[in-house]
Amino acid sequence: MLQNVHLMQSWLVGLNGLEGYLEEIAKTCHPGFRCFISSEPPPLADMNIIPESILQASIKIANEAPQDLKTNLRRCFAHFNQGFIDKSPKPNDYKAILFSLCYFHSLILGRKKFGTQGWSRGYNFNDGDLTICANVLHNYLAKYEQVPYDDLKYIFGEIMYGGHITDAWDRRTNNTYLQVLIH
């Protein structure tokens, strides 16, 4: 992943990269021309993904997760359309566990407003964690006759979300949320 960030920086910077290309285009382009670039925060705090010169010349919009539980839960459900939910082999089980998963995701994202209180440090959980867990849930429900709750909690808590967590007490907090919500 760090190598990919370095490669991305190399084609963005300088006269031969995106920066130079945009400067060249700006001389002859239509006055209504706009270039949209999106990115996620870099994996390490000392890294920059988009060069400073491009950022200074840009209008920046940050899409932060909402702080309250209800709005965050609504935002989580927006990732899944009805067709995605209906294609599950066990739609009732899928809906119930997906709701618990969205609730869990909303809870841990909503904790950001408290800083690291309750956690040893802040973790960068994102919507990709939620959507991957929903896909894993779909695959497990298709594969097994009975819902493998313990397997799902382990995968969600130790692998998917747990992959971000570095502290044993934080892992315990994370898994306790899942124990209470998914059963």
Image (cartoon, rainbow, N blue to C red):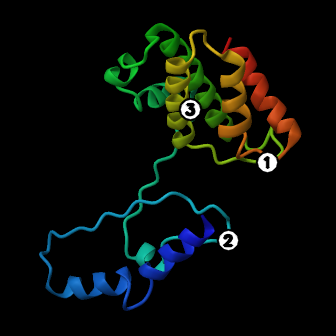
Give how far apart the Cα atoms at labels 3 and 1 are: 23 Å
Q: Is residue 66 visible?
A: no
Q: Amino acid at mark 1?
A: Arg
**Label ID, residue 163:** none
**Where in the figure is residue 172, as x and y percent of width and height?**
83, 31
The residue at which mark 1 appears reads as 121
**Label ID, residue 46:** 2
Residue furthest to the bottom in view is 15
> Compared to 14, does 178 lie above or below?
above
Q: Please identify the quadrant where the C terminus is shown.
A: top right
Q: Is residue 149 visible?
A: yes
First in sequence, mark 3 or 2: give its number: 2
The residue under the point 73% across, 15% down is 180
**Label ID, residue 133:** 3
**Where in the figure is residue 32, as x and y percent of width and height?**
15, 69
Secondary structure of residue under mark 2: loop
Question: How crowded is the residue under tag 3: few (<14 C-alpha within 10 Å), some, or many (20+)?
Answer: many
